[in-house]
């Protein structure tokens, strides 16, 4: 069977949901939350609230991820679970349009639910990588997804930025209305471009009609067996410990960078434009990292990306102008997609077949538990010290710790295959 239609349909979902990651999580929500929903508070209080919302969403996914993964593998319903979370994310994202000014609690609540839909769906989306990627092509297929995510999210983000910067040209009465409308645009984009995955991607194992008799016992047994097998595989748990730390740093940079720049007194317009540049730099850079993974192995590519992130953390201490933030944004674009995509493909190489979603549930759980620490750590350190730079510096410890664990992982080689 020709795998290419499934591969590109799978990768196109990254194009779809990256609009949320870019335009909402990293871009407009932090700005709009501070300026519209939490405008009457000190900048450090807004940072604390934003960090708390991100932490709560991550905690909910972290607690549910291994159970959802085990249940999905048991009943072979990856696409069904994915559809549930996709619909949740789309509806809650669109709902942000209707939240009135000053209602930060309602905005935080919808944002938490939308983020839960985004992150929960990724458990099942990531596990489908092993269903669509032929042997020897994991690194490139994983990188293709992230690369399309950059360009797709960047295109939608560029359109939303245009609406916000020139609201009159698009028929909006104010920038606030244009920014609110961007949440509706993200929801529509996510919905439309998610369709090919549900039409063309078919998990290897046929979705079985297993009756849900005694589901809790079966669920618990499946999860227990997965944890028992994982404990016996040093490569797997060493990787997960490292991933737990360094992906926290990656997620914190994604979610809190704009807030950090605003706390440093930078213009929100410069910050949003810098994020836009990141998207288009990330597209080719992620594809290059896919090639690095094929040639030298994903572990080498991840270590290269983590070294770049350490440089970014140090460089953030010297940010005083919008131009400085732009340079850092370009640097993030060069390494972010590579670290994410090669982490996914390296983990896919390490895990046994037949338990993909359960293992990726643990993978996403640790990633989400790490994100519980990161935004809270950065927000709390900034709040207590009254120094935003102290908060961002704390993220460097996570990159260093993750690197140390990753050095002990022995990756499995794949037979190379020319695919596209």
Image (tube, rainbow, N blue to C red):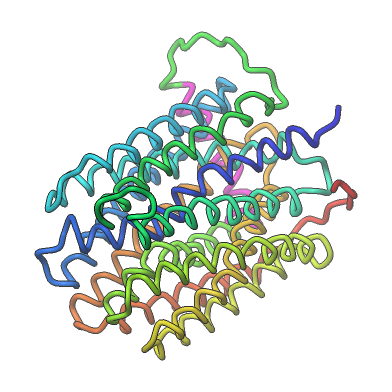
- At horizontal 41% and vertical 60% (from top left) the residue drawn is 26
Residue closer to the observer: 347 or 88: 88
Q: State left or right for residue 103 relative to residue 164.
A: left
Which image quarter: residue 413? Answer: bottom right
Picture mark count: 0
Does the magenta stretch mainly form a helix, a strand or a loop? helix
Residue 228 in picture, x, y percent from top left:
56, 41
Instruction: Decide if residue 416 is on the left or right side of residue 368.
Output: right
Is residue 268 found left or right of 237 in the rendered image? Answer: left
Is the residue 314 above or below the residue 149 in the image? below
Give the vertical position of 115 relative to 325 (above or below). above
Of residue 56 and residue 411, the one placed in the foreground of this image is: 56
- Residue under the image location 50 percent in, 74 percent down: 329
Q: Check the image and report above or below for 197 versus 326.
A: above
Q: Which residues are magenta?
A: 218-237
From the top left corner, tell me how far across and down residue 348 is, in percent.
68, 47
- In percent of width and height, residue 5 lies at 76, 33
- The residue under the point 41% across, 42% down is 185
Which of 347/295 is in front? 295
Q: Horizontal and vertical percent for residue 79?
A: 56, 26
Q: Is residue 314 magenta?
A: no
* Quadrant where the N terminus is found in the figure: top right
């Amino acid at each position: 069977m020709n795998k290419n239609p499934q591969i590109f349909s799978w990768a196109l979902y990254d194009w779809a949901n990256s609009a949320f990651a870019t335009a909402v999580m990293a871009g407009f929500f932090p700005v709009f939350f501070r300026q519209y929903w939490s405008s009457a508070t000190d900048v450090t209080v807004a940072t604390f609230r934003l960090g708390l919302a991100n932490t709560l969403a991550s905690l909910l996914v972290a607690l549910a991820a291994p159970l959802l993964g085990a249940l999905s593998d048991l009943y072979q319903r990856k696409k069904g679970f994915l559809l549930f979370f996709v619909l949740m994310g789309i509806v809650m994202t669109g709902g942000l349009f209707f939240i009135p000014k000053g209602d930060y609690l309602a905005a935080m609540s919808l944002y938490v639910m939308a983020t839960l839909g985004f992150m929960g769906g990724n458990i099942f989306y990531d596990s489908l990588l092993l269903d669509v990627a032929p042997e020897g092509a994991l690194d490139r297929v994983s990188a293709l997804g992230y690369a399309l995510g950059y360009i797709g999210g960047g295109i939608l983000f560029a359109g939303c930025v245009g609406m916000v910067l020139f609201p009159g040209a698009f028929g909006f009465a104010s920038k606030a209305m244009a920014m609110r409308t961007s949440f509706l645009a993200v929801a529509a984009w996510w919905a439309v471009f998610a369709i090919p995955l549900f039409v063309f991607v078919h998990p290897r194992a046929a979705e079985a009609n297993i009756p849900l008799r005694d589901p809790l016992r079966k669920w618990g047994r499946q999860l227990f067996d997965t944890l028992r097998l994982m404990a016996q595989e040093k490569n797997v748990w060493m990787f997960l410990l490292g991933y737990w730390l360094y992906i926290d740093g990656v997620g914190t940079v994604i979610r809190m960078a704009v807030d950090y720049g605003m706390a440093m007194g930078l213009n929100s317009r410069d910050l949003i434009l810098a994020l836009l540049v990141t998207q288009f730099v990330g597209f080719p850079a992620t594809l290059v990292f896919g090639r690095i993974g094929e040639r030298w192995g994903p572990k080498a590519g991840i270590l290269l990306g983590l070294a770049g992130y350490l440089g970014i953390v140090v460089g953030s201490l010297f940010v005083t102008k919008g131009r400085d933030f732009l340079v850092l944004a370009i640097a993030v674009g060069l390494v972010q997609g590579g670290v994410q995509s090669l982490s996914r493909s390296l983990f896919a190489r390490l895990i046994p077949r037949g338990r993909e979603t359960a293992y990726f549930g643990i993978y996403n759980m640790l990633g989400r538990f790490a994100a519980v620490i990161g935004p809270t750590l950065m927000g709390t350190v900034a709040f207590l010290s009254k120094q935003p730079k102290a908060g961002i510096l704390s993220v460097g410890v996570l990159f260093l710790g993750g690197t140390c664990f990753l050095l002990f992982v022995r990756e499995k080689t794949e037979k190379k295959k020319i695919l596209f």
